[in-house]
Amino acid sequence: MPTLFDDLIHTLFPSYCLGCRRAIPPKTTLCLHCLGELPPTNSHLSESNPLIKLLQQLAPISHATALLFFEQQGLVQQLIHQLKYMNREQLGSLFGAQLGQKLIDSPFLSCELVVPIPLHKRRQRQRGYNQVSQFGQQLARQLQIDYVPHNLVRHKATKTLVRLNTHQRAAQIKNAFSVVDSSVFTGKHLLLVDDVVTTGTTLSEAANCLLQIEDLQVSVATIAFAKSPLP
Ligand SMILES: [Zn+2]
């Protein structure tokens, strides 16, 4: 039971778990209990995992993995919400470091650049940051490759895709992306990163845009994958 003093200290120097609000050592993000509760997909271990099977129906993507399974009302959903809407960017960093460690000795080592799914500039201005930046930067650091955030751009503002079915999502996102300077990506193996995959519409639209560039390969890494995609 935390004392009043503990409460005061944690108000001044907040070091509590973002999953359960237990006190944790400074500069950590989640307690050991919550870390143990995160459900890993371990998709990087299988070349025919459910995520790559989903994405390959939509775009010729080479490899795909997600760090965690996403379930409505679960811990991962709660953490992603904080990452997206409550300025908890450090969660992206934690997830990037965790996935980066797993990808050592995997086919993802042939990736040469990390490219985040961009937000439309208006959305990014409202939020103040792109929620996949820290995840992508940490992954790039672990894989010892460059992070390239501004060459793939989203020039079409889309409404939230959450309540739309696959067909409606595809129509919303169609032609939403473009590349500023294709020579930066020519001949490269890109690692495209995003927060959560549900239907794969956004990632595949971005991948298909990128794959118009000569001699390009696209792989995908995300924080989470929703096990039962929307109809
Ligand atoms: Zn916790």
Image (cartoon, rainbow, N blue to C red):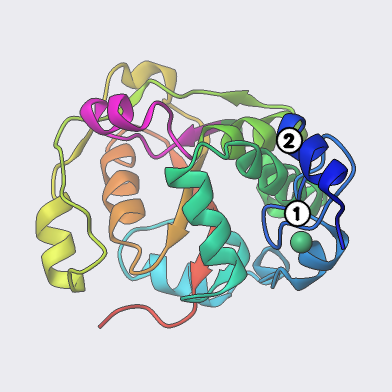
The amino acid type of the residue labelled 2 equals: Leu
Nearer to the camera, 124 or 109: 124
Which disc is residue 106 wearing?
Answer: 1
**Disc 2, SS:** helix
| Residue designated by label 2 | 143
Q: Quadrant of the C terminus?
A: bottom left
Check disc 1: other Cα within 10 Å, few if <14, some if 14-19, many if 20+.
few
**Disc 1, SS:** loop
Give the Cα separation between the discs numbered 1 and 2: 11 Å
Q: Position of residue 122 (x, y in %)?
A: 21, 27
Residue 62 appears in view: no
Indicate whether residue 49 is drawn in magenta: no
Looking at the image, in which quadrant does ligand 1 appear? Answer: bottom right
Q: Quadrant of the N terminus?
A: bottom right
Check disc 2: other Cα within 10 Å, few if <14, some if 14-19, many if 20+.
many
Q: Which residues are magenta?
A: 114-131
In the image, residue 7 above or below residue 47:
above
In the image, residue 183 above or below residue 65:
above
In the image, residue 41 above or below residue 220:
below
Q: Residue at x 78, y 38 (%)?
A: 8
Q: Residue at x 86, y 42 (%)?
A: 5
Q: Position of residue 203 (x, y in %)?
A: 36, 52
- Left or right, 77 with reference to 101: left
The image quarter in which residue 66 lies: bottom right
